[in-house]
Image (spheres, rainbow, N blue to C red):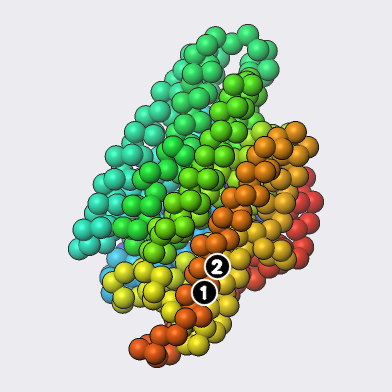
Amino acid sequence: MSTLIAISGLGIICLIIEILNLRKILVPIAVILLLGILGLTIAESHLGESFWKFENYGMIVNTPYTQGFSSLFIILAIFIIIMSPKFYENNIAKIADYISLKIFLLAGAVAMVSFGNLAMFFIGLEVLSIVVYVLSSSNIKDARSNEAGLKYFIMGAFASSFVLFGIALIYGAIGSFNIDNIYTASLTGTLPIWFNIGFMMVVVGLLFKASTFPFHFWAPDVYEGSPTLTTAMMSTLVKVAAIGTLFKMVSIMPGGMTSTFQTVIIILSILTMTVANITGLRQRNIKRMMAYSGISHAGFMMMTLLSLNSASNAVLYYAAAYSFAGIAAFAVILIVCQGKGNEDISNFHGLFRRQPMLATILSLAMLSMGGIPVLAGFFAKLFVFEQMLQANHILLVIFGVINSIIAVYYYIGVINSMLEKNDGDTVFRVPISYRLVALCAIVFNLILGIFPSIIMNLSL
């Protein structure tokens, strides 16, 4: 509860800073306070108790799992906010609006993963969704941005209606929104059929937010049309928030984990990976390629739903490894594609000659997402495959390995494009904020690859 209150308070502080016309100190204050909130969250996780005692009526539950994901969300939000001043330099008068929206999105993500009551879960989901609707269409002079915002709003509202109706059915079956009561009742195995229907509807809504097959069709268009910084946020923070919440939601309703549901998860995981990677092979727009890459990784993270009792560390590790690689990649994409009017892969021709450091960072990010050893992406897939082998889901491991090989092809394609000659372009200036974020994100990824125990030894 302390983390959520502190983040919400920070969002209000950002608005007050704008009222006081202190716009120049907005980003430093936001970053410093977010670092303080991160320290607060980590300290509470180690101590096992909250510094601030609030009666939250069971609306928020602090566990090592929720605090681990909350810490990841805060780090990702810090990266996004650091890049915001340069990205919005042509619309700097509204920088406080953009920063505060991102912080409120962070509050929604934390509420989603920390919920102790289904009402709080839905509030967090809607706060996060509404912010993304606004930011997706924030470039009002760009028809693609308007289209992306409208498309995501219509599809997102449809998914939210599924979630809300599912929550109503679960309440009708159990008579409580509290997750402890739901968990206890779910273990009895004598619940009415509408509990299973409600469970499936909530899962469908979260699968939409995570952009898994067959609920992925909106992602490439929305990712391509949205402002690139918003795309980076959707591809990382929003996606891992949906996955982390989905894992927790399924964990508190073990009664819904029927053999039929497990079969559906296996099929959807295979189709999500396969369809996304095959389609990704043909993409020439790097934002669309990253969209299909994210869909594929959602398929890998879905596997953890089949091993709820032992996969908490694996899903957090995978989310961190994927997010850091994604943030590093998008920081480079922002640098290379600024002012180009498009995000075609041809923009990256000759990058190794023009900006070897940026090219190296992007290459490492691509290799991590492809699952190449030493980088965290390799161990993320390894830990997930290990969980699937222990659960005797060998078929999923086989398809996972095959899809990893397919994905490497288009990741290597980006690296090859940076090696191609492009005599028309000269060396360009790199904003320090983008460079800093790209470097820090890929370093975090490397550290997790070298020391996976940082997350895997946590008691989640």
Of the 4 image quadrants, the one containing the C terminus is top right
Please, what is the three-letter code of the amino acid marked with disc 2? Answer: Ile
* Place of residue 32 in the rendered image (x, y in percent of width and height, measured from the top left): 54, 68
**Image quadrant for the N terminus?**
top right
For residue 422, above or below residue 39? below
Left or right: 38, with 340 as reference point = right
Give me the residue at 56% from left, 50% from top.
297
Amino acid type shown at disc 1 = Asn
Residue 395, image x and y in percent?
Answer: 67, 37
Q: Where is mark 1, residue-wise?
A: 416
What label sits on residue 412 in the rendered view? 2
SS under mark 2: helix
| Horizontal side of residue 374 vs 41, given as left or right | right
Q: Secondary structure at mark 1?
A: helix
Instruction: Bin the neighbour count of mark 2 within 10 Å (Cα to Cα): few under 14, some 14-19, many 20 and up.
Output: some
Q: Check if mark 1's residue and mark 2's residue have beta carbons within 8 Å.
A: yes
